[in-house]
Image (cartoon, rainbow, N blue to C red):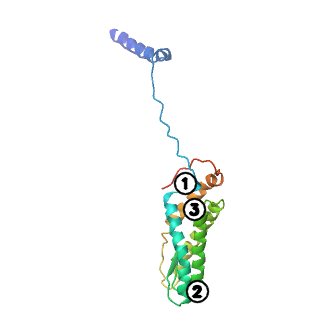
Amino acid sequence: MDCIILVRCFFSYIYLTLTPHHMEQKNINIPAPKIIPPKKAKRRRDLLPWWIVVFIWLFFVFCALMPVALIFGLLHINFELSLLGVTTEKPFSLIGAFLIVLFGFKGVVSYGLWQEQNWAIDVAKIDAIISIAICILAMIFSIFGPPHTFNIRLELLVIFPYYYKMDKLQYDWENFDDGGSIEPAEEIV
């Protein structure tokens, strides 16, 4: 019998200490979580992750080398061009002309992104789709072409995230006000 009274007293005590009227009397200070606001982008260029900026500058350099390739082609000197699994040593061939145009297109895309043009994201997404198609065609041709081996194009490991990032940035890029700022979307590294 004493045991039952003790258990009842214990549960009564627990009930009384946990009821809301007792909690209101206590001053419980729960610290608010610290909210760190995202940094504001001052320019559209700030929305681009570092790895895309690296490729922008690489394609600036490659695009600047295309006149050199044309001069070597005029002098009948071999100049190796290679991009996305397509390779040639002769700039004045069908494949060479295709690669020069492709490097030029990637240079225009890089220029558009670096100069924060409105059309840059749309053209960058088109560039990514064309690059994916060329890589897939290069892999298919490697099976049926002269070496008869299957090559996996590692460029796809960069092109797919590039397309995804351009797609995620499109809204922020297009709605960026020139005088103000916008919060950058989450960054993929």
Three-letter amino acid code at disc 1?
Asp
Q: Residue under label 3, please give it.
A: 114
Q: At numbered mark 2, what does the secondary structure look like: helix, strand or loop?
A: loop
For residue 115, what is the image quadrant?
bottom right
Residue 146 in the image: above or below residue 83: below
Residue 94 coordinates in the image, percent (x, y) = 60, 84
Relative horizontal placement of residue 165, taking residue 1 as reference (left or right): right
For residue 13, what is the image quadrant?
top left
Disc 1 crowd, CA 10 A, few/some/many (<14, 14-19, 20+)? some
Task: Return the mark for residue 46.
Answer: 1
Q: Residue under label 2, please give it.
A: 93
Disc 3 crowd, CA 10 A, few/some/many (<14, 14-19, 20+)? some
- x 53%, y 90%: residue: 75
Task: Return the mark for residue 14.
Answer: none
Residue 160 coordinates in the image, percent (x, y) = 54, 63
> Which of these two is toward me, 59 or 130?
59
- x 57%, y 66%: residue: 110
Question: Mark 1 to mark 3: distance in Å?
Answer: 10 Å
- x 50%, y 84%: residue: 79
Relative horizontal placement of residue 108, taking residue 51 as reference (left or right): right
Question: Mark 1 to mark 2: distance in Å?
Answer: 39 Å
Q: At numbered mark 1, what does the secondary structure look like: helix, strand or loop?
A: helix
